[in-house]
Image (cartoon, rainbow, N blue to C red):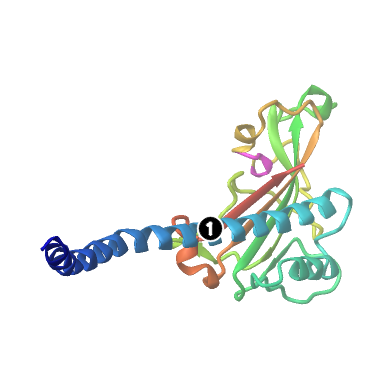
Amino acid sequence: MSFRVSLRRRKGQRGSELVEFALYGVLMIPVLTWTFVNGFNELRANQCQQINIQIANQYIHGVDYSTYAAQQVAVRLAQGYQLSVNSFSGNQADNTSSSGQVYFMLSQVMYIGTGACGTQSPCNNKNKYVYLQQITFGNPSITFNGTQVSSKLGSLTATRTSGGYVTNILTDAGAVCANCANFFQTQLTDGQVAYVVEGFFADPALGVAAYPSGGIYTQTFM
């Protein structure tokens, strides 16, 4: 008799087990998808940061990224992320492309104190961070969640040479790095220079994996 009761109980439980499994799947599938997406995004973010660091390392050691040859090195480093640069000869401070999914901004910034001002009077940019140089290449029109990318340091509007060097760092208001002070835990000393590389990666292959930023922003200070 007990065997028959147990058999009937097992038959009656089969439907409930299926329902439990379905409910479990409904709950777990989003969790597993979220884990995969964010894990993939973290991997890509680490790769992009490594590319940024390698370019910054070369930049601080004297590689002239205002030349096409140096930018071709960056293209090889960023292989798989669709960095596109136009060919040119000589030096070019801005090599913007309408194609590709990567944009780089390389900057040298300096703190202007009394010593850096020297005999200049007036020294309008005294006690401020200024750009010494900025070189850009890639596609500046890429967007993250519909917003065009831009430097987190602030805009550089001062006149530059073909090599990207600012021609008047002491008095040109357009040379001031408006947001630089926010990125240094310890203020640079008078005349001290820092190298900054910013990379923007909006590869469509990231797709959902770019959630929630819509792309990958990298920044390296040296």
Above or below, comparing residue 217 to residue 84 in the picture: above
Could you tell me which quadrant the C terminus lies in? top right
Q: In the rendered view, does 47 fall on the left or right side of 89?
A: left
The residue wearing badge 1 is 39
Above or below, comparing residue 35 to residue 126 in the picture: below
Residue 59 position, x and y percent, is 82, 53
Could you tell me which quadrant the N terminus lies in? bottom left
Q: Residue at x 20, y 65 (%)?
A: 19
Q: Is residue 157 visible?
A: no
In reply to whether residue 175 is colored magenta, the answer given is yes
Outermost residue toward the right in this view: 62
Q: Quadrant of residue 118?
A: top right
Q: Quadrant of residue 181?
A: top right
Q: Residue at x 78, y 65 (%)?
A: 92
Query: Helix or strand or loop: what does disc 1 sit on?
Result: helix
Q: Residue at x 81, y 60 (%)?
A: 65
The residue segment tinted magenta is 174-178
